[in-house]
């Protein structure tokens, strides 16, 4: 079974790679065929993820990812694109080769996109490609876009592509509509309705069926930037009635002086569940976000049972270099619900609520240097200072550190 699955995958990848050649032979000569590559290598050091200096949990690992992209265009309104990916985390997972994207796109005003594809909705707070992770995220999907004046309307139906770090057997579906209205040069309003359905199987009704409705407003007029996104959720989580909400507010101001300093402010909140023993589930579902660089770069948070503040400073010493310093303040929205890391999994939980909500603070320092159009270097360091919550629950609250260095090549 496993063997035949692997065989099918290899066949699929070969078919995708050879599609351009086949189409040449069939006389479907494309106007433009492009082959590009992407290579990314990242080295990371993580220490004290257990917040206890007397136990050694030092980790040093590297992840590399290579993508081969093929795009083929017939006039302006038909396109084929495929991206084959090889991703590897040294020492932790086996090599992983997969078809990351492979789709056809047709039409201009009314556009259809069919096949395996990424989704990046709004600022990726709810749905994004999770590009920071080595394997990233794509969906097998049908998407329809309609463009009219200052508006874009989109409907889609998608099934999450499983990668090596996902539990087997749980098929996950996402569908809905995402719409964009560029009110004028400075004001943008997006509205959405998203449905998430997860089939867990097994005895009893364990399926998850959650609806999310919300909007995203952006005011972007230099030197000011403001962004507000308040989604609400309802539905069923197995036997439990799901009801939750969240919001995020981002504001920044760029000073007119050398290095273009930009002062940033962020506030985010997502409901948690006040009582783990009743029949209601109030933990906000973060769906499929790109959380990295959003709720602290150390990735110890999700937009889920969260009460968050941030102040940050961004400097641009040159056109090629951007440097950031952020200070983050984290609390749980509900003491009895869990503390969730960026991928949505649980870090720790005190179901009694006696440990309070003060999870901690985080100092992030990171920079990106674009050597040229093809090559980008990035370097960052984060220190997480656990709060009273960790001290009460685990008896220890020692800082956790994380350091990374990444080289990215694209042509
Ligand atoms: Ca430790
Ligand atoms: Ca509950």
Image (cartoon, rainbow, N blue to C red):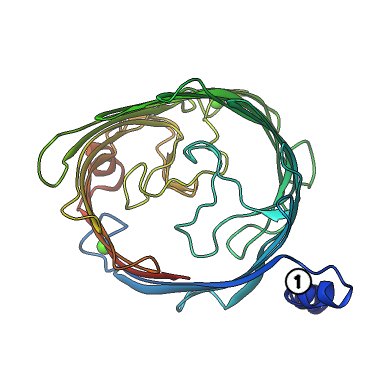
Q: Report the residue that reaches farthest toward the right.
A: 26
Residue 55: quarter of image = bottom left
Residue denoted by label 1: 16
Picture coordinates of residue 81, whole percent (x, y):
68, 62
Q: Is residue 201 left or right of residue 253?
A: right
Regarding residue 89, the answer to whether it shows in the image is yes
Residue 314: quarter of image = top left
Regarding residue 45, the answer to whether it shows in the image is no
Residue 286 position (above or below residue 3) = above
Q: What residue is rendered at 45% in x and 78% in y? A: 90
Residue 358 position (above or below residue 271) = below
Picture coordinates of residue 192, whole percent (x, y):
61, 26
Q: Is residue 349 left or right of residue 255?
A: right
Q: What residue is rendered at 69% in x and 59% in y? A: 168
Q: What residue is rendered at 79% in x and 72% in y? A: 19
Front residue of 355/157: it is: 157
Front residue of 171/372: it is: 372
Q: Quadrant of the N terminus?
A: bottom right
Picture coordinates of residue 358, whole percent (x, y):
27, 34
């Amino acid at each position: 079974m496993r063997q035949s699955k692997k065989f099918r995958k290899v066949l699929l990848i070969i078919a995708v790679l050879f599609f351009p050649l086949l189409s040449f032979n069939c006389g479907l000569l494309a106007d433009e065929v492009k082959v590009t590559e992407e290579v990314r290598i990242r080295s990371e050091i993580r220490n004290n993820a257990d917040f206890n200096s007397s136990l050694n949990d030092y980790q040093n690992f590297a992840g590399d990812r290579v993508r081969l992209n093929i795009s083929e265009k017939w006039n302006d309104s038909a396109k084929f694109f495929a991206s084959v990916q090889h991703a590897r985390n040294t020492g932790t997972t086996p090599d992983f080769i997969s078809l990351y994207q492979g789709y056809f796109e047709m039409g201009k005003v009314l556009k259809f996109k069919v096949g395996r594809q990424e989704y990046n909705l709004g600022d990726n707070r709810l749905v994004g490609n999770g590009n920071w992770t080595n394997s990233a995220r794509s969906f097998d999907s049908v998407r329809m876009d309609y463009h009219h004046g200052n508006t874009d309307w989109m409907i889609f139906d998608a099934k999450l592509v499983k990668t090596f770090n996902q539990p087997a057997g749980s098929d996950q579906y996402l569908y809905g509509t995402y719409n964009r209205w560029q009110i004028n040069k400075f004001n943008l309003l997006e509205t959405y309705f998203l449905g998430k359905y997860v089939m867990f199987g097994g005895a009893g009704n364990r399926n998850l069926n959650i609806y999310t409705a919300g909007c995203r407003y952006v005011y972007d007029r230099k030197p000011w930037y403001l962004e507000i996104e308040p989604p609400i959720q309802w539905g069923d989580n197995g036997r439990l009635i799901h009801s939750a909400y969240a919001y995020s507010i981002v504001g920044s101001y760029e000073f007119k002086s050398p290095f273009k300093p930009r002062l940033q402010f962020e506030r985010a909140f997502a409901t948690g569940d006040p009582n783990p023993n009743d029949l209601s589930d109030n933990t906000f579902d973060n769906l499929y976000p790109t959380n990295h660089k959003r709720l602290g770069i150390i990735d110890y948070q999700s937009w889920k049972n969260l009460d968050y503040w941030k102040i940050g400073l961004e400097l641009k010493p040159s056109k090629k270099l951007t440097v950031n310093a952020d200070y983050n303040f984290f609390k749980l929205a509900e003491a009895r619900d869990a503390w969730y890391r960026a991928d949505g999994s649980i870090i720790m939980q005190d179901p009694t609520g006696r440990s309070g909500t003060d999870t901690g603070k985080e100092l992030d320092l990171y920079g990106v240097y674009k050597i040229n159009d093809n090559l980008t270097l990035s370097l960052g360091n984060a220190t997480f200072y656990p709060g009273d919550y960790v001290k009460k629950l685990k008896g220890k609250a020692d800082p956790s550190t994380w350091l990374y260095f990444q080289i990215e090549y694209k042509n």
